[in-house]
Image: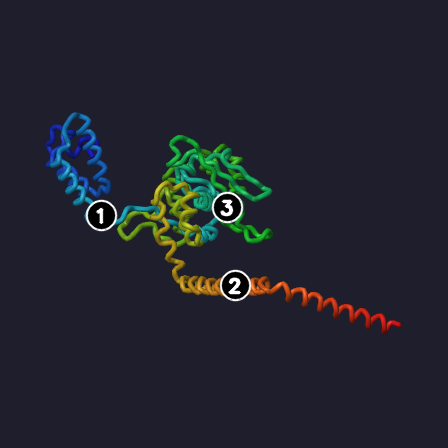
Amino acid sequence: MWEGQAIPNEAGIADPFLVTPDLIFTVMGALDAGGYRSTELYLDAARQQHINRGYDWTQQLALTAKRATRACKRGRGPSKQAQPLPLEKVPSVPQQAKAVHPGGPLYPARATVLVSWWLLREIEASNAEISHIAIDQENRLAHWRLPHSKTDWVALGATRTHACSCRSSSAIDPICPFHCMVAQLEFAKTRGPYLFPTDAGGQPVKAGWVATFEWVALHLNEPLTTATGASRFTGHTGRATGAVHLAQTQIELWRIQLFGCWGSEAFKLYVRQAPLSQLHLLAQEASVHTALASAKAELAAIFAQIKSSQDLLAKQSIAQQPNAMFGGLRGSNRFYTCSLTSGN
């Protein structure tokens, strides 16, 4: 909140860490007017500094902080989220080798496909090395060990695996994660240790990834900004693209969350619109479920009838069963005698 102490100093406040109601309203108001969306986080940092210096956080300050926070949140609108790209359309983008930004990856279209399938942030993709990839040619599996991730603060690492998604052995799907990874590895091994090398052979930077996603978006006729003028694509666009693509193909959300190692429900902000594209199939699904329920009921009735018949046979008297058996034997003997007579 008091970064550089510029706002308190400009307001003539001598001690910016001695929080007062006037200070809260003055600084929070200035930040809100400047378009800051995290004013309450700055206020919380000021509160901690206030307490650390031995000052009391009174009920008056708490009430003032609550009112100021509520005022700043009013009319703020939804939080900014990286927008996805239509992954299935990326093969229509020029498959050039040249990077679109000095700090961007070579083969930008293929790089977009890979970071999307593996649900990666730009920092994870930038840190990826060739040694982190293992290819199982026999089973057509691509394993990616991720030693750096937002939730992996103790560096335990996580491995995400994708199988070949080609529908036939004779034709390669242009967005198959396995074949894209094999091609990327063959190329990257000639350029250095990084999986997504730049023109200079180094690591891509955030601006390079953003420029790459925007370049793909332009070729797909996707708008680069929202109605308010904010950028639609960020370093998390690859992660959003993969999550939305999986959700649109009716992959269960809990499986997407597990694969992407989301520790919270935040990933639902990415996929919140994806299920809407399948809502027109609800009537068909309901019809199928009704038909299945009816078939199960019919099968249950048939099984019940069979069991009833078996129980009825089991309850027949012992006297009836030998007669039926011996009658059959007598009939067989007569047939056997007639056969011998006719033979003579």
Q: Please tell me which residue is depicted at 23% across the width and 37% down the height of the picture.
A: 41
Instruction: Tell me what residue is drawn at x 52 percent, y 49 percent.
Output: 165
- Element marked by disc 3: helix
**Label located before the other in sequence (1 or 2):** 1
The N terminus appears in which quarter of the rendering? top left
- Mark 3 to mark 2 CA distance (whole Å): 49 Å
Label 2: few (<14), some or many (≥20) within 10 Å?
A: few
Q: Which residue is mark 1?
A: 76
Q: Is residue 211 above or below residue 1?
A: below
Question: For the residue carrying disc 1, how many other residues have a C-alpha within 10 Å: few (<14), some (14-19), or many (20+)?
Answer: few
Does residue 219 appear in this view? no
Q: Nearer the viewer, mark 1 or mark 2?
A: 2
Q: Going 35% across and 54% down the picture, which residue do you hit?
A: 273
Q: Amino acid at mark 1?
A: Arg
Type of the residue with mark 3? Pro
The mark nearer the N terminus, 3 or 1, is 1
Q: Mark 3 and mark 1: span between their CA atoms?
A: 39 Å
Q: Quadrant of the C terminus?
A: bottom right
Dot placed on the residue nearer the N-terminal end, 3 or 2: 3
Residue on which the image places disc 2: 304
